[in-house]
Image (cartoon, coloured by chain):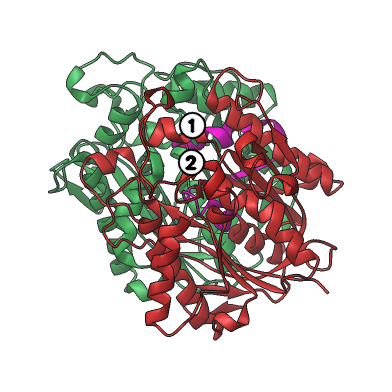
Chain colours: A red, B green
Amino acid sequence: MQVGKASVRFEKPPVIEAAASIAGKKEGEGPLGKMIDLVVEDAMFGTDNWEQAESTLQKKTALMAMEKGGLQKKDIRYLFAGDLLGQLIATSFGLMDLEVPLFGLYGACSTMGESLSLGAMTVQAGYAERVMAVASSHFATAEKQFRFPLAYGNQRPFSATWTVTGCGAVVLSAEGKKGMARVAGITTGRIVDMGATDSMNMGAAMAPSAYHTIRQNFEDMDVNETYYDKIITGDLGEIGRKILLDFMKKDGYDLEDVHMDCGMEIFDKESQDTHAGGSGCGCAAVTLCSMILPKIQDGTWKRVLFVPTGALLSTVSFNEGQSIPGIAHGVMLEHID
Amino acid sequence: MQVGKASVRFEKPPVIEAAASIAGKKEGEGPLGKMIDLVVEDAMFGTDNWEQAESTLQKKTALMAMEKGGLQKKDIRYLFAGDLLGQLIATSFGLMDLEVPLFGLYGACSTMGESLSLGAMTVQAGYAERVMAVASSHFATAEKQFRFPLAYGNQRPFSATWTVTGCGAVVLSAEGKKGMARVAGITTGRIVDMGATDSMNMGAAMAPSAYHTIRQNFEDMDVNETYYDKIITGDLGEIGRKILLDFMKKDGYDLEDVHMDCGMEIFDKESQDTHAGGSGCGCAAVTLCSMILPKIQDGTWKRVLFVPTGALLSTVSFNEGQSIPGIAHGVMLEHID
């Protein structure tokens, strides 16, 4: 069961029984627009402020995932959830009404990988028949917290990414259930810091952690890039992708064709002016639920290594001159025959 | 294994093999002073700012727990850790050098309960031989983030608690190992909001969640207050304790003698001017490692329900007029004969 240094291969792989995604107007206009379950034009989601908007987004997505699975609140044993905001307020206020035991997680934009990992571990161990993994982000709450208030209208360098307004929620269930994909194994990331200090170039901050987790997965599982139909990182964007591919190439792995990045899939760079790509917990979460899982379900991809990447950016540590460390959590997703 | 609505009783109870606590000068002058492994007089821990101080505190404590257990970094398979700061910067920067896979957690002051729970689940499932659970807080980083900069010298009402500068770290190992106590089971909390809105009275905000988790534990495990030698909450303080005891009394449970609160143990109210008591992730974590575990080890207490309590306070949601929800995670600790 325990494999190598940082991985688990599940003997009874948990099943992703249902998944739902909700996103904002801009995401709806992007390449994934038609695959996202619900696109909400009002960025305020009918509430009074951005934070309540994100909470509402998260709650609606969780409820939709249950509905798609034909499930009720009482069928979900644990929630594994998080967001980008201090004290996880989108999660706390969003999931409160579900009245389900909650493990609050913080992995920056890697949170969907962290929640899937812990959720799968919990289900296969028999602690729960069903759990839910949830992660969200909102452009306006994130910009307000991490960079500049929107009203400043500051210019964005080309290396900047665009925080996705969106949420993904996944129901993980015990082996044997019907579902979209199974979780074959996980590789858990550690914090990697190569000294990146530019908050407008998060791809560069995260690429080393993605590299580390993918290499660790190859080593622990005794595989290489040819084992997977796709290796999908969270939100490296164009610049981060280049760094990752360079690092891997030096070790003798060619990821040129097999690699995909959620941040580069969710927006159309030319028409949407999003520069390096999408980011935020919602980026990997929405891409997973709207595009990756359906493609695994229909057999387009048989084996996927899903690696959401997080930049542990804090305005406090950043202003104190610290670097931006990264973390990436790998989840092995497989087609169910 | 799965018991009732929100609990797990472990068939192969993981063992707390080693534990360490480090705290600041004020905590060292309190009633637990002599039991804390290391008291550091310099609140800056030799660094340039408060956040680095807390990171250093966390790193030193984790290394000390390993040392006390005769272990090296490579013996620890996963870290389950968190703190109170946005983006968990005390944890990210503190535990980076350990180079161990990390699950970052946010449960406010309940984090030690959350990390112990997930750590114990991971060990008993066989995903790891050994993991570490860590939680910290620092008076100066917390006041700066949540309330007023220290230099303002604002007055504190009597309902206010004092954030503990301290960290606790615990090594959880597979059944059969020698150790200080075993983890017999867990009861995972959900978010409970009864509308408390006073950030200077966190005990009142957290008491309902403690009540909920303790009641759930009684129900799931089919026990009552007489089953435990002690039921120990995290940082309710005097006011929160009164509320908890009142709530329990209405349901027919008398917790007057069996209840203890880490926040009321760690400081001497009369001489230390800490008002309602101690708080912060470090409060429950330091009390656990310095006092509770040794008393379980020597047999003073055979069965303890440890219930760290968290108030999900955020300055953003607070300033937007939202309430302060709470969460509490229960961990059943037992003497090893």
Residue B165 at least partly seen: no
Residue interval drawn in magenta: A86-115
Give coordinates of residue A41: x percent, y percent.
Answer: 67, 29
Going by the image, does A276 lie left or right of B176?
left
| Above or below: residue B8 compared with residue A163 | below
Crowd class of label 2 (few under 14; some 14 to 19; many from 20; radius 10 Å): many
Give coordinates of residue B185: x percent, y percent.
Answer: 61, 55
**CA–CA distance between discs 2 and 1?**
9 Å
Output the chain of dot 2: A
Kind of residue at badge 2: Leu
Give coordinates of residue B198: x percent, y percent.
Answer: 45, 16
**Position of the N terminus of chain B by quadrant:** bottom right
Crowd class of label 1 (few under 14; some 14 to 19; many from 20; radius 10 Å): many
The residue positioned 63% from the left and 32% from the top of the image is A94
Give coordinates of residue B267: x percent, y percent.
Answer: 29, 32
Kind of residue at badge 1: Thr
Helix, strand or loop under label 2: loop
Disc number for residue A141: 1
Q: Are marks 2 and 1 on the same chain?
A: yes
Marks 2 & 1, CB-CB < 8 Å contact: yes
- In the current view of this chain or complex, which residue is farthest to the front? A270
The residue positioned 50% from the left and 54% from the top of the image is A235
Name the residue nearer the viewer: A216 or A148. Answer: A148
The residue that disc 2 covers is A84
- Residue A258 covered by magenta stretch: no
The residue positioned 68% from the left and 34% from the top of the image is A59
| Above or below: residue B42 compared with residue B318 | below
Image quadrant in which you'd find residue A199:
top left
Going by the image, does A9 lie left or right of B198?
right
Helix, strand or loop for the magenta stretch, by majority: helix
Output the chain of dot 1: A
